[in-house]
Amino acid sequence: MPLRNKANDYLIDRKLQRTKSYTGIKGVSEQDAAVQDSQGPIADRSREHLGPTDLGIMHFRKLVMDAARALQNGEAPPHVAHQDRYTVRSGACVTSKSKDLTAVMIERFGDPAGFVGGPGQNAAAE
């Protein structure tokens, strides 16, 4: 259990909130948790007006709903058969401008494409 959590109101520092931080909560993870916890129960999104920039949200919701329907019908979601597609991770790296992207990816992730447990895994060691 994190020190800052819902039970203790994430130890909101009201002075910090008035002077420096909009949330008054120390720590990015704790701020994320507070936002997620404050959303409450599942919301009715049927009257929501999504625009073109919300395309990712629309695709994700469709993916989740299709997977839920498949489970209701006793079928494994199709994504289970393609777990290798989820072996790419994001990350940040501050490096010299002289390094090309492939070198940076190998240095940071051990693979030229950022794969984890997939094609070319641990290319840096090869």
Image: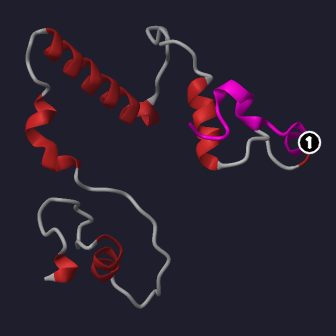
The chief SS type of the magenta part is helix
Q: Position of residue 47 (x, y in %)?
A: 49, 8
The one of 55 and 109 positioned closer to us in this rendering: 109
Q: Position of residue 63 (x, y in %)?
A: 25, 27
Q: Residue at x 76, y 36 (%)?
A: 11
Q: Position of residue 96 (x, y in %)?
A: 47, 87
Residue 6 higher or lower than 92, as above or below: above
Taking 25 as reference, is 89 left or right?
Answer: left
Range drawn in magenta: 1-18
Label 1: how many Cα within 10 Å (few below 14, some 14–19, many 20+) = few
Question: Can you tell which quarter of the image residue 67 is in?
Answer: top left
The residue carrying mark 1 is: 15
Q: Secondary structure at mark 1?
A: helix
Residue 98 higher or lower than 82, as above or below: below
Q: Residue at x 58, y 21 (%)?
A: 39
Q: Position of residue 61 (x, y in %)?
A: 34, 24
Q: Residue at x 91, y 41 (%)?
A: 18
Q: Quadrant of the N terminus?
A: top right
Q: Quadrant of the C terminus?
A: bottom left
Count how many numbered circles sit on residues in the image.
1
The one of 50 and 19 positioned closer to us in this rendering: 19
Magenta segment includes 119: no
Tell me which colouring the rendered structure shows. secondary structure
Indicate the amino acid at tag 1: Lys
